[in-house]
Image (spheres, rainbow, N blue to C red):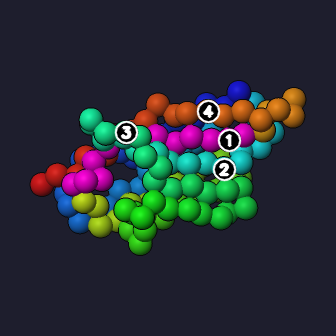
Amino acid sequence: QVQLVESGGDLVQPGGSLRLSCAASGRFASINTVTWYRQAPGKERELVASITSAGSTNYADAVKGRFTISRDNAKNTVALQMNSLKPEDTAVYSCYADYLRRDGYGARAWGQGTQVTVSS
């Protein structure tokens, strides 16, 4: 089973930057696609960015050009570099991973989330 732990959330001023990290640990064969989601108070959860095991990326229109997702397969970590932050980026950011168990079955895991607040 995979455990995902996010870190890097903080209070930042508009226009600032943050780097979130999602670290995977536990017993698994491989991590496939990892996706960052966010959920603001009173709103539905939305996809922010995703990255496949091969490094292909996908971004929500709201963050294109400002956010960059990357991964280090050797360290089982995925990062989300967030630049030019806006107040509307305020949310709890969570990572979600599709992974392959050692028994050959696919599975999924969520992290606990990290709070990002953009405010002056």
Q: Is residue 8 left or right of residue 6?
A: left
Mark toward the viewer: 3 or 4 = 3
Q: Is residue 79 above or below residue 64?
A: above
Toward which corner of the image does residue 57 lie, by quadrant?
bottom right
Gap in angstroms between the C-alphas marked 2 and 4 = 11 Å
Which one is earlier in the sequence, the residue at label 1 or at label 3?
Answer: 3
* Label annotation for residue 109: 4
Give the residue type at disc 2: Thr
Whether 4 is among the magenta residues is: no
> Residue at coordinates 35% horizontally, 65% vertically from top-left?
83
> Residue at coordinates 52% horizontally, 42% vertically from top-left?
95
Which residue has dot 1 on it?
Answer: 98
Give the residue type at disc 1: Asp
> Residue at coordinates 41% horizontally, 55% vertically from top-left?
19
* Label annotation for residue 44: 3
Which residue has dot 2 on it?
Answer: 33
